[in-house]
């Protein structure tokens, strides 16, 4: 049932494809969520990058390698969870000199365009726990623009994103550790707390 509803959502996509193509003034590929529709944990990232667009799947390439450590510590398999992003398309910038395309954080407008789809997606999935990676999904899911991962990381909190109370466990984005080595220990400690939370609440 959930799978059928997700398939319908992706096919109709809340006019998301139309909005995005008009926004970028060209055809833009979407990268939808991946995983078991009946999963008790939904992992929410920011947006797909180049590798995700090429594969049509979230968290592959370098992001996938970061995810492997996450899954290993929690003793989970990728197929046991559902993985998606707030934004379903790749936000990018073009270097004027080199014409090279690189990733960038999504704008507020891009997040606003994407939010109705994410709400419906999580409403269908109805997992026991949401795990967000980084500031973008934290702000989106809590509805608080001033929320920061530095304040909320590693602590479960109740949110009402879909109209139903759900538990969110915010984490730093694994990629942030690459640029800020001092976060590594914090990130690993948060994963330990998440693992304890999963066992204590009989999730999985």
Image (spheres, rainbow, N blue to C red):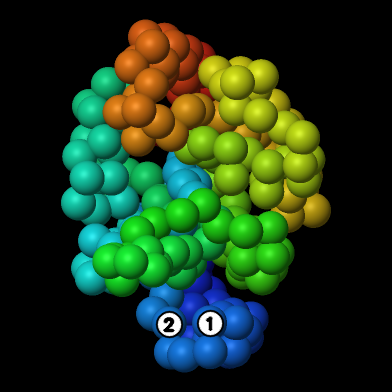
Label disc, if present, on residue 24 of the rendered structure: 1
| Rendered view: 150 above or below 36 | above
* Observer-nearest of 99 and 147: 99
Q: Which residue is drawn at 26% across and 36% down?
A: 66
Q: Where is residue 155 in the image (x, y as percent from the top left)?
A: 61, 18
- Callout 2: SS: loop
* Observer-nearest of 79 and 91: 91
Residue at the disc numbered 2: 28
- Callout 1: SS: helix
Gap between marks 1 and 2, in whole Å?
7 Å
Total tally of numbered discs in the picture = 2
| Rendered view: 58 above or below 144 | below
Quarter holding residue 183 = top left
The reply to whether the C-beta atoms of the residues labelled 1 and 2 are less than 8 Å apart is yes
| Rendered view: 161 above or below 109 | above
Q: Can residue 53 be seen in this view?
A: no
Quarter holding residue 175 = top left
Q: Where is residue 18 in the image (x, y as percent from the top left)?
A: 58, 89
């Amino acid at each position: 049932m959930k799978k059928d509803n997700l398939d319908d959502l992706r096919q109709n996509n809340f006019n998301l494809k139309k909005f995005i193509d008009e926004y970028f003034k060209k055809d833009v590929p979407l990268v939808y969520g991946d995983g078991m529709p009946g999963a008790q944990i939904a992992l929410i990232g920011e947006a797909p990058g180049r590798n995700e667009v090429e594969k049509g799947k979230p968290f592959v390439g370098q992001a996938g390698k970061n995810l492997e450590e996450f899954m290993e510590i929690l003793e989970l398999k990728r197929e046991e969870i559902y993985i998606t992003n707030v934004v379903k398309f790749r936000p990018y910038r073009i270097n004027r000199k080199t014409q090279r395309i690189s990733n960038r954080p999504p704008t507020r407008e891009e997040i606003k365009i994407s939010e109705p789809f994410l709400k419906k997606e999580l409403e269908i999935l109805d997992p026991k726990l949401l795990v967000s990676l980084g500031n973008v999904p934290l702000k989106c899911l809590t509805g608080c623009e001033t929320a920061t991962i530095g304040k909320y990381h590693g602590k479960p909190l109740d949110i009402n994103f879909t109209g139903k109370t759900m538990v969110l466990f915010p984490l730093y984005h694994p990629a942030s550790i690459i640029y800020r080595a001092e976060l590594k220990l914090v990130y690993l400690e948060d994963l330990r707390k998440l693992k304890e939370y999963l066992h204590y609440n009989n999730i999985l």
